[in-house]
Image: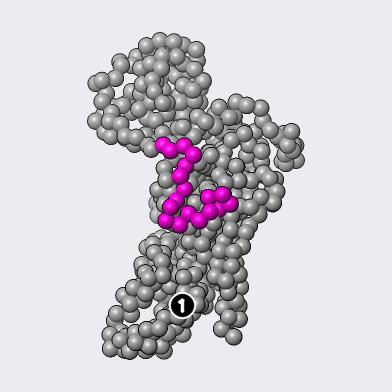
Amino acid sequence: MKKLARRLAALALSAALLVTPAGAVTKDGESETWFDSVWALIDMFGLKAEDDPYVLQNYINKYLQKHPEELYEVVNDILSLLDTHSMYLSAEEYSQGFSQLEGYVGIGVALEQTAAGARVGDVVRYSAADEAGIRTGDLIIAVNGKDTTAMNIAQIAELLRGKEGTRVTLTLRRQGRDIEVSCVRRQINQVYVSGRTLSDGVEYIKVAAMGSENDWKAFSELWEGLDEKNTRALVLDLRGNGGGLIDVAFQMADAIVQAKDTPLASIRYRADMGGAQTTYSSGGGLPLNKVVVLVDGGTASAAELLAGSLRDTGSATLLGTQTYGKGQGQFHLELINGDKLIITTLEMELPRTGAYEGAGLTPDILLENRQVTIDRAALTPLDTGKALRFGDRSDAVYAMTERLALLGLLPGATEVFDGQVLDAVSAFRASYALPADLYASPAMLSALDGAMRTLDGQTLLLDEQLYTAHEICRLAAAKPQQYVSLPDGSWRAK
């Protein structure tokens, strides 16, 4: 009967491995019963607790009857014997440590106070407000028919809050016209995925976390738009990504891998929860010439699963520094008092690398970012009165590229204005909101010289990892494209 209960519980939780509550644990106010309830969860789900009953449970119960205030410390001591990732956290500690997973209930708007009244300063992507068509700049005139024109943003925010599933109606003033919008309050999660174009044929996608399905939606939109840009190479940045939802990592890997039925990774549960389960690719990934994945010591857990899966399937090259080495996953179980029990329930194993818990992933290209101190007096004098153009060869080009290299846009100074220098010039112009031109204008050179004055004496960390990844992808993008974009928005392989 105990085994059956475990299997049923496993089925109830398997859809969302990291954040779905497993139901509240009943607490009757006594530490003995409370410890029994917490221990039942450890025994039921703990990867390392299978068939290893805790023989001192009765002794600990008696101890906690006399010292109920030590429950927190005792449970964490027990969990530390199982593995390094399981822990018992207060609600406050959990919110601080797992904010990217937790989210909040609302409609998904940020408010700002203006002379005309409270207005929408931002709309969270994929939120109820986003779907209802609320726009940045909308003035909030009323909430549920209550006039808000004399209220401050804190008072209006209080009216917008409420229980999940409840409806709220906003009266908005947009360009002199009042409109009414209805939203249903729901879980709101920040989106941790963004992208931009690095150069012709090279795109960049940053995944800072995999906190919710919204991150998969954002990634999917960017990925599906690559063919419309005739993308031939991609830099996928997973640096500092501590992980999140395993399902989202698998979805991203599956989108990229081209071959069908390729093993992406295996998840090993306890034997009574299904044992090892392997996920295979569905195939059909866009045939890019190159994918480079950036990783570092902050790349962990599900982010390592994504990076390792892409490398082991031959779909990507890893560049950066050794990853963290968190190859075990946890259930986050909510207790009736709001505390959280985080218990390790699975281990992730890659097709070729295998388990990476405690070891991490070694990049194919090991590369550290480096620091540089700006010394403006030691730089070659820069003439800001004369434009520099593609094909120029001069000391003036050297002076310009010397400065661009200090900003991390070039590997070093050169006296030749070639395509690589043109990309660096374009990147600098974009960061300073200068008009896009295919040359270095006097205005651009003046801005570059001003940047050196501002940064004189400062130590900068040059992102050589991103620069190198871009250069690898730029060279790959120069090769023939492997697919043809079709008028209906789809593509076919050549």
* Above or below, comparing residue 12 to residue 384 in the picture: below
Specify whether 433 is left or right of 17.
Answer: left
Task: Tell me, yes or no, if residue 121 can be seen here.
Answer: no
Q: Type of residue at label 1?
A: Asp
Q: Looking at the image, which residue is at 50% across and 48% down?
A: 207
Dot 1: element: loop
How crowded pointer 1 is (Cα within 10 Å; few <14, some 14-19, many 20+) is rated as: few
Horizontal side of residue 464 vs 268, given as left or right: left
Image position of 198 with respect to 11: above or below: above
Q: Is residue 104 above or below residue 386?
A: below
Whether residue 314 appears in this view of the structure is yes
**Quarter residue 451 falls in:** top left
Q: Nearer the viewer, residue 214 or 330?
A: 330
The residue depicted at 42 percent of the width and 62 percent of the height is 98
Tell how many labels.
1
Q: Quadrant of the C terminus?
A: top right
Where residue 105 sits: x, y (%)?
Answer: 49, 66
Residues shaded magenta: 350-367
The residue singled out by tag 1 in the image is 52
Q: Is residue 469 above or below residue 312?
A: above
Based on the picture, tell me whether residue 82 belongs to the magenta stretch. no
- Screen quadrant of the N terminus: bottom right
Residue drawn at x 63%, y 52% is: 263
Tell me where residue 323 appears, x and y as whole percent.
Answer: 43, 48
> Which residue occupies the foreground of this view, 360 or 221?
360
Question: Which residue is drawn at the image coordinates 56% and 78% (left, top)?
Answer: 6
Across and down, in percent, residue 446 comes to: 36, 21
Majority SS type along the magenta span: loop
In the image, 456 versus 56, the foreground residue is 56
